[in-house]
Amino acid sequence: MIGLDGQTRLAELQAVPFEEHGRLHIISSGRDVTAQREAEARLHQVQKMDAVGQLTGGIAHDFNNLLTVIIGNLDLEPEPPARRVPAWRSNRRCGRQSAARPHASAAGLLAPADA
């Protein structure tokens, strides 16, 4: 329906038929529910965003845990014989750097949004 302000409004209508003196009559009433429906739509959007945030946080948390294990295992790897130490150190450093970037990204996803 169109409101007095010319804007389209949502209405909730109720009608009850009844018979009196052999004639059918209808009593009806209606109310503007535009504000209520808009509030419900905003609440639904907030709930969807909350669900996406929880999902993202869960994925980031699991990813962060996996990267922590990878980094920890790189640190615990025993040092090889002396002739292979330089290559081993280079590989370990490369592995730690490769894991550190996504580790920092996951930590950023886990940080509170209002921080």
Image: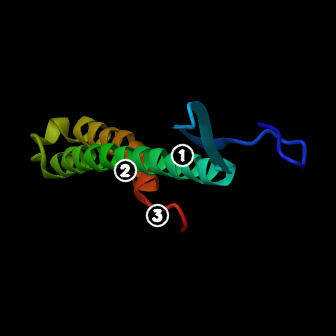
Asked which secondary structure carries label 3, the reply is: loop
Left or right: 58 in relation to 21? left
Q: Which mark is residue 101?
A: none
Asked which secondary structure carries label 1, the reply is: helix
Q: How many marks?
A: 3
Q: Crowding near pointer 3: few (<14 within 10 Å), some, many (20+)?
A: few
Q: Crowding near pointer 1: few (<14 within 10 Å), some, many (20+)?
A: few
Q: Quadrant of residue 94?
A: top left
Mark 1 or mark 3: which is in front? 1
The residue located at (60%, 47%) in the rendering is 37
Q: Position of residue 112 (x, y in %)?
A: 46, 63
Amino acid type, residue under disc 2 in the picture: Gln
Query: Which residue occupies the extreme bottom position in the image?
Result: 115
Of 12 and 101, the residue lying toward us = 12
Of callouts 2 and 1, which one flags the residue occurring earlier in the amino acid sequence?
1
Mark 2 or mark 3: which is in front? 2
Circle 3 is placed at which residue position? 112
Q: Quadrant of residue 97?
A: top left
Q: Quadrant of residue 90?
A: top left
The residue located at (46%, 44%) in the rendering is 48
Amino acid type, residue under disc 3 in the picture: Pro
Q: Position of residue 28 (x, y in %)?
A: 62, 43
Asked which secondary structure carries label 2, the reply is: helix
Amino acid type, residue under disc 1 in the picture: Gln
Circle 1 is placed at which residue position? 45
